[in-house]
Amino acid sequence: MPTIHILPHPEYCPQGTRIQAPAGTSICEALLDNKINIEHACDMSCACTTCHVVVRQGIESLNEPDEAEEDLLDRAWGLEPQSRLSCQAILAQTDLTVEIPRYTINHAKENH
């Protein structure tokens, strides 16, 4: 079972932590299952960017992003080459280090 090292985030995981999740699970599901309440405004349907994460280590072990994910990532705040939508990034057997960006674009949460 791979370990996900989550870097500190002031709102979701202030101290940072390490969690384990079974291979075949999305990063978003793993975070939510471990009470790290990352935003996921579209209920993990690949229709927004609120679950955007930056995979600092282990990105090569994840499934390849499809065209829909890549198109959405272009709109994510703080996009980096290692960015993924956590709802679409499926764990393999390799450990990961993940950073949750400080900001997200969530019009519902921002009352737009």
Image (cartoon, rainbow, N blue to C red):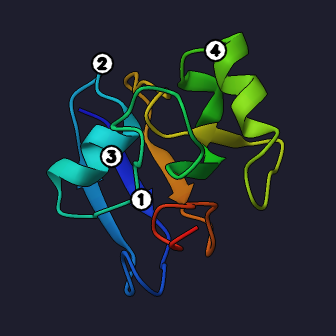
Q: CA distance from mark 3 to mark 4?
A: 20 Å
Residue under the point 28% across and 63% down: 37
Asked whether disc 1 touches disc 3, contact meaning CB atoms under 8 Å apart, the reply is yes
Residue under the point 29% across and 27% down: 25
For residue 56, above or below residue 105 = above
Dot 4 or dot 1: first in sequence order is 1
For residue 38, above or below residue 85 = below
Count of all numbered marks drawn on residues in the image: 4
Q: Residues within 10 Å of mark 3 (few under 14, many from 20)?
A: some
For residue 65, above or below residue 25 = above
| Label 3 sits on residue | 3
| Label 4 sits on residue | 64
What's the amino acid at mark 1? His
* Tag nearer the camera, 3 or 4: 4
Task: Tell me, for residue 5, which label it has, or none.
Answer: 1
| Secondary-structure class at tag 1 | strand
| Secondary-structure class at tag 4 | loop
Residue under the point 62% across and 47% down: 57
Q: Residue furthest front?
A: 112
Inspect this view and state whether residue 85 appears: yes
Towards the viewer: 111 or 32: 111
What's the amino acid at mark 3? Thr
Residue under the point 38% across and 60% down: 38
Towards the viewer: 38 or 14: 38
| Label 2 sits on residue | 24
Q: CA distance from mark 4 to mark 1?
A: 20 Å
Q: Position of residue 11 (x, y in %)?
A: 41, 83
Q: Residues within 10 Å of mark 2 (few under 14, many from 20)?
A: few
Q: CA distance from mark 2 to mark 4?
A: 13 Å
